[in-house]
Image (cartoon, coloured by chain):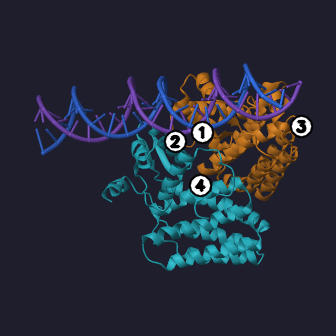
Chain colours: A orange, B cyan, C purple, D blue
DNA sequence: GCCGATCAAATTGTATACGATTATCTGCAT
DNA sequence: ATGCAGATAATCGTATACAATTTGATCGGC
């Protein structure tokens, strides 16, 4: 799973490629934290950057706003979303709500080949964890999300898969904003435990581990209200 | 709850009103089955109908395609979505997956005022069920969905609420396509049972009833593959 | 020096224009 | 009559143009 763009499902096979490419590029930039929350994304700039007209840039930004990664304010423009603590809590609540169900469906359809893929993902994750540097950190963030997306894909439900893609992407944004420790490094071992439980056929344990895992990620956040101070902060960077 | 547009949450407060109005109008038309699946929605026609340029019409159609109500095919245009049987099954699987969780969260936050609202909804539903005519049928369809949306709203999670809005809307489309009996008239009593179970504090029963209820709706569908025969059918109508 | 008003620049909102693609129609040959 | 070829019409994809709104700056008054 290289990126969210190469989803196996054929759901949005229809949209125009130009707009889609721009959307995916910006989404990756947001998820990998190359674009900080609050950053302005003016239509003109985006268009120039990708050598297209404002029309297409605007369409891409609109699309991202439907995913919750960008917030567009009337007559003011588009910004990388700046999720509130409450929004952050809702994102993780949603994940706790849906991921156990996805896990059960995935377990019901899982094949040895799938397990192999999952283990490969874990290996990659572990490798990145031991590396140093920004690039490795970004790759680690993405890999960590890919584990959850892979489960959604195995579940075979394209609708839940798309929803999970949204939730995982928004989670990255939240972690970028409110995360304290470098990265939820605890996460990796937890992923492994979940796979082990699935392999062992112990679904209840797997679901319990999943819920704990999501709560661990959320627990690493500092979700205390920060006044408008956060705004200045964004400009200072 | 008059329509999906007056959602209490402030999530998509940002989008332009013009496009949003058009989007909501078309969505309502699709959900109330005034627009049949497969119907072509050309940008020019939509624009003329609402007295706006193709630009805005296109934006509205794009938005609807993100919700799965419209499918846009490159260089061919937009059509009211024609969900496949497999897609239909995934929609109901998704609902079985998320609605029990939503129900639990809603039950945890529910107030007497909320219960009153729910009961009022049931009353309205019952009234519409006894009425005759297309108009009443359409209102009944919407009312039936509003019950589920109300629970999502009570749950207090704006993200799950939006997801449920999408699922309910797409369910209407599926029922329009594959529904056999006039309307899931069994649904109404089931809604009442669920509310009763919630009031009684019996969450496990409420969740069980909810899952059965969703399965009942799905069981009323005829999801056998129809070859391209269905296409001719569409033109014959 | 600080504050409010007016003007200029930048950006968004919407419409229109034009090239590209698809669908339809006609006419001719088989 | 049937089937294919070219032309014609309709529709989409994208860019550009213009109006409306916001933002920032300059200037005068206090």
The x and y percentages for residue D12 are 42, 37
* Of labels 2 and 3, the one closer to you: 2
The reply to whether dot 2 and dot 3 touch (C-beta < 8 Å) is: no
- Please give the residue where the numbered disc 2 appears in the rendered image: B59
The x and y percentages for residue A229 are 86, 37
Gap between marks 1 and 4, in whole Å? 18 Å
Callout 1 secondary element: helix
Q: B121 and A180: which one is in front?
A: B121
Chain for mark 2? B
Gap between marks 2 and 3, in whole Å? 41 Å
Chain for mark 1? A
* Of labels 2 and 4, the one closer to you: 2
Looking at the image, residue B16 sits to the left or right of residue B178; the answer is right
The x and y percentages for residue A237 are 82, 27
Q: Residue at x 81, y 38 (%)?
A: A177
Do pointers 2 and 4 mark residues of a single chain?
A: yes
- Please give the residue where the numbered disc 1 appears in the rendered image: A62
């Amino acid at each position: 799973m290289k990126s969210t763009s190469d989803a196996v499902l054929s759901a949005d096979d229809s949209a125009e490629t130009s707009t889609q490419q721009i959307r995916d590029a910006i989404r990756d930039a947001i998820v990998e934290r190359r674009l900080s929350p609050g950053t302005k994304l003016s239509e003109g700039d985006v268009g120039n950057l990708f050598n297209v007209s404002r029309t297409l840039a605007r369409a891409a930004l609109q699309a991202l706003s439907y995913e919750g990664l960008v917030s567009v304010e009337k007559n003011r423009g588009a910004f990388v979303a700046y999720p509130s603590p409450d929004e952050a809590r809702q994102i993780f609540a949603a994940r706790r709500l849906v991921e156990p169900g996805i896990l059960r469906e995935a377990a019901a359809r899982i094949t040895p080949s799938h397990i192999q893929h999952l283990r490969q993902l874990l290996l990659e994750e572990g490798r990145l964890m031991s590396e140093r540097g920004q690039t490795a950190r970004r790759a680690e963030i993405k890999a960590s999300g890919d584990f959850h997306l892979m489960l959604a894909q195995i579940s075979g439900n394209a609708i839940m898969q798309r929803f999970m893609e949204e939730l995982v992407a928004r989670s990255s944004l939240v972690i970028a904003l409110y995360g304290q420790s470098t990265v939820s490094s605890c996460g990796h071992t937890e992923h492994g435990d979940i796979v082990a439980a699935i392999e062992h056929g112990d679904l209840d344990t797997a679901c319990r581990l999943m819920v704990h895992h999501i709560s661990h990620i959320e627990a690493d956040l500092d979700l205390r209200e920060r006044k408008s101070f956060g705004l200045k902060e964004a400009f200072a960077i």
